[in-house]
Amino acid sequence: MKLEMKTTLYLARHGETQWNKLQRLQGQLDSPLTELGKSQSANVAQAVINNKIAWVFSSNLGRAIKSAEICNALLKSSIQIDIGLIERNLGELQGKKISILSQTINYHELLHQYTDLTPLGGESAIACGERIYNTLENIAIEHKHTNILVVFHGEALRCFYGYIGINSTRNAYDLFANGCITALNYDHNTATFQLTSAL
């Protein structure tokens, strides 16, 4: 009988930003955390503080890094920046308000579905999902038998869910609140991920 070999990843969305508050699509652009966003980031750390977090991984975007730094002030772990965790590149949609984008013809397919439709200058949901999957798998393999906090982005998380077969017709704003956390196990025996719970 094989011994259980797993790595647990706690996937967290960064805290609220100024553009989140304005419902402006950020993608790979950036805006600072609000005061609420800073509090949400501290709450992420409190939620996992008893889980012996060995590493805090972050996207290379400022809002994720700041959230990770706030978390790590409490967790006192080691922070690693990984560009593979960057938010989906939404090309020409980035910086525009959701209220305007929702009136365009491809809005629902681009931001509510998991397809290969690609915004001009951007990345498809399928390509993003595959990138996030590969990045998380590499992190898990490199850090066996540890608990890791991963701070990244809502749309990237939605695309990852699509890649592992969990699809929704809602957008990332509706699916993943700022500061939300989902526990994810990587089984090294079967080389598969399993979502376990939301914290």
Image (cartoon, rainbow, N blue to C red):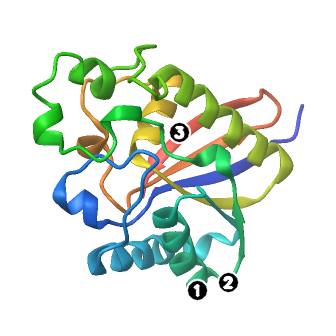
* Left or right, 117 with reference to 142: left
Tell me which amino acid carries mark 2: Lys
Q: Give the x, y percent position of residue 105.
A: 17, 16
Q: Rounded to the nearest whole Å, what is the CA distance between mark 2 and mark 1?
A: 6 Å
Q: Residue at x 40, y 35 (%)?
A: 90
Tell me which amino acid carries mark 3: Leu
Secondary structure beneath disc 1? helix
Secondary structure beneath disc 2? loop
Q: Residue at x 68, y 72 (%)?
A: 52
Q: Give the x, y percent position of residue 53.
A: 67, 69
Q: Quadrant of the C terminus?
A: bottom left
Secondary structure beneath disc 3? strand
Question: Can you see residue 62?
Answer: yes
- Which residue in the protein does label 3 denote? 195
- Which residue in the protein does label 2 denote? 76
Compared to residue 106, the image places residue 156 above or below, namely below
Chain-order first, disc 3 or disc 1: 1
